[in-house]
Image: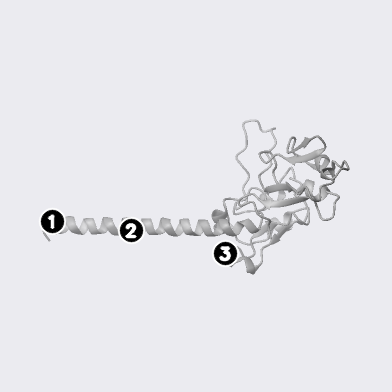
Amino acid sequence: MTKDQKNVELDRRDFFRLGIKKAAKTAVDLAQTRVVQRAKRYIRPPFALAELDFIIKCTRCTACIEACPQDIIFPLSTRLGVEVMSTPALDLLAGACLLCEDWPCVRACEVKALQLPEPSADEKEPITAPRLGLAVIDPAHCLPFSGPECGACGAACPIKGAIEWEMTKPKINEELCCGCAQCHAACITDPKAILMRSVQIGEDPA
């Protein structure tokens, strides 16, 4: 083989290597887009990895489901797709995440699909509440918007400043709200005046 032929062969190899890398990246990007779009229909447990990483790591072992003291973690059904089938999600319409101090659901996950952040320099400093979802007030059912005072949601909220007040009307501070649904659980109206939405897309979870 001549020197020119060798150079041509090397160029071909480089071309195919580059093509394979680009194809792989495109496949990953498409998968990421698909799973994130689907994730608008549910809310993951505390400290879940990014959706695609979570799906890959989660072994569907049910340890986090069994560890939850409030029994609000459940396995997703097959109707949402085989990729997410039996992976855990939060049922924040049935109950609230109490942001347990020792995070039993997270500590039960041996494969680290749920993973606590690195500890701060001050070991006594509590772990900041994770962003689970987002509470949204429905003025059509919220009592203060029609006259009577209430305040049940504000008394239940564990995050200082997450619920603000404009006169007597509650307003969610989206920067501070962690989506734990404690305000939703405390709401006294029927139907509830506080809705829970996915933090990724902003639509109602299934």
Kindly indicate whether the residue at mark 2 contacts the one at mark 1 (C-beta within 8 angstroms).
Answer: no
Identify the residue position indicated by label 1 in the image: 4
Location of residue 46 with respect to 118 vertically, above or below: below
On the image, the x and y values in percent for residue 79 come to 64, 69
Give the SS element for disc 1.
helix
Pointer 2: what residue?
Answer: 19
Q: Position of residue 85 (x, y in %)?
A: 62, 65
Front: mark 1 or 2: 2
Q: Which mark is residue 154?
A: none
Q: Residue at x 54, y 54 (%)?
A: 53
Locate the N terminus by quadrant: bottom left
Disc 3 marks a residue whose amino acid type is Glu
Residue toward you, 110 or 86 = 86
Of all residues shown, which one is farthest toward the top?
122
- 59 lies above or below 162: below
Sooner in the amino-acid sequence: mark 1 or mark 3: 1
Task: Give how far apart the Cα atoms at labels 2 and 3 are.
Answer: 27 Å
Q: Residues within 10 Å of mark 1 (few under 14, many from 20)?
A: few
